[in-house]
């Protein structure tokens, strides 16, 4: 069974997924970050593929992507770094990146490398739904990979239900239509959005991401979905501490406050 599906079958609530950008803070830091987070009890990891124009990301992740590219990170390098990662890491791993680098790498080659290195799913925020159905889904299915789609407060019910019908794994609920970043709390409008999506009784489980950085936002996410995704705050802490162990400890401590 795909590890993402297995996670959601065995843990129905309180799932915590962390995002980092491959190649940041150093070119070769990805394997250490993955192993450290897995050892700290993180449930799932999203590995960012750096891109020069990350339209859905705020300044923290944009800066991390810029540094990663300057450090020399490429998809080919990342897949080399992921060789053997499954010898020590059992939790789900997801690659998150924009369409251009993946398209340039080649869909077939990309998904073959994902399968070879033990990746369980991919998130491609700017992937058109028609391209997903025609070109990406058949390749992903053949490699037992899950393609995770994002929804926002502005996504229509029709599209949400379409995504739910044609994907497997989980639905990524973006907390707002803005870019990634931290927030102190989720307002009434965001709570209404969470309630509405829950009322649709989707087949797939949901994780909430964008803006989670403290106990209040984490609690709101856990109350309205199967778990939370944290990116910008962890990337900030990686920059601050320079090593994943201290950064993860600091994040887990901040989520209690």
Image (cartoon, rainbow, N blue to C red):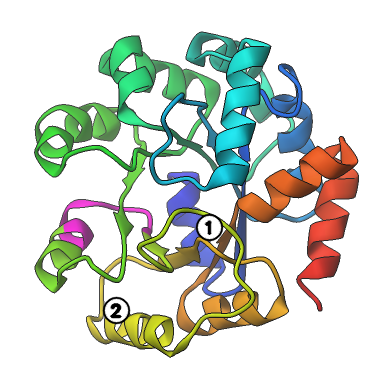
- Is 162 one of the magenta-colored residues? no
Image check: 159 left or right of 255?
left
Q: Which residues are magenta?
A: 163-171
Number of residues whose C-alpha sits closer than 10 Å to that of mark 1, classed few (under 14), some (14–19) or many (20 or more): some
Furthest toward the front, the residue is 59
For the C terminus, the quadrant is bottom right
The location of residue 159, given as percent across then percent down, is: 14, 62
Between the C-alphas of marks 2 and 1, the distance is: 21 Å
Task: Looking at the picture, tell me which residue is in the foreground, 158 or 26.
Answer: 26
State the residue at coordinates (20%, 35%): 137
State the residue at coordinates (22%, 81%): 200
Up-down relation of residue 234 to residue 107 (above or below): below
Task: Looking at the picture, tell me which residue is in the foreground, 6 or 77.
Answer: 77
Name which of mark 2 and mark 1 comes first in the sequence.
Answer: 1
Badge 2 element: helix
State the residue at coordinates (38%, 81%): 194
Residue matched to label 2: 197
Image check: 40 left or right of 193?
right
State the residue at coordinates (55%, 36%): 62
Number of residues whose C-alpha sits closer than 10 Å to that of mark 2, classed few (under 14), some (14–19) or many (20 or more): many
Q: Is residue 46 visible?
A: no
Q: Is residue 68 visible?
A: yes
Residue matched to label 1: 7
The location of residue 119, given as percent across then percent down, is: 50, 32
Up-down relation of residue 30 to residue 251 (above or below): above
- Which picture quadrant has residue 114? top left
Image check: 61 left or right of 111?
right
- Which picture quadrant has residue 100? top left
The location of residue 49, given as percent across then percent down, is: 50, 28
Q: Closer to the camera: disc 2 or disc 1?
A: 2
């Amino acid at each position: 069974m795909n590890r993402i599906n297995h996670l959601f079958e065995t843990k129905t609530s309180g799932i915590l997924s962390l995002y980092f950008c491959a190649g940041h803070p150093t070119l070769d830091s990805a394997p250490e970050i993955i192993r450290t987070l897995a050892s700290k009890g993180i449930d799932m990891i999203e590995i960012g593929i750096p891109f020069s124009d990350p339209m859905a990301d705020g300044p923290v992740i944009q800066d991390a992507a810029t540094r990663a590219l300057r450090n020399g990170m490429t998809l080919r390098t990342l897949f080399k770094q992921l060789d053997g990662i499954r010898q020590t890491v059992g939790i789900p791993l997801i690659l998150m990146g924009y369409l251009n680098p993946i398209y340039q790498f080649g869909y077939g080659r990309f998904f073959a490398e994902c399968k070879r290195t033990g990746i369980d799913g991919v998130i491609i925020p700017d992937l058109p739904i028609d391209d997903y159905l025609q070109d990406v889904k058949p390749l992903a299915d053949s490699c037992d990979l899950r393609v995770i789609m994002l929804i926002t407060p502005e996504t229509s019910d029709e599209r949400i239900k379409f995504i739910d019908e044609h994907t497997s794994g989980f639905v990524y609920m973006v907390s707002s239509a803005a870019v990634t970043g931290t927030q102190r709390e989720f307002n009434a409008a965001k709570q209404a959005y969470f309630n509405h999506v829950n009322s649709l009784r989707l087949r797939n489980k949901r994780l909430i991401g964008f803006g989670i950085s403290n106990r209040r936002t984490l609690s709101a996410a856990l109350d309205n979905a199967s778990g939370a995704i944290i990116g910008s705050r962890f990337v900030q802490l990686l920059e601050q501490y320079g090593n994943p162990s201290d950064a993860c400890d600091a994040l887990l401590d901040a989520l209690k406050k």
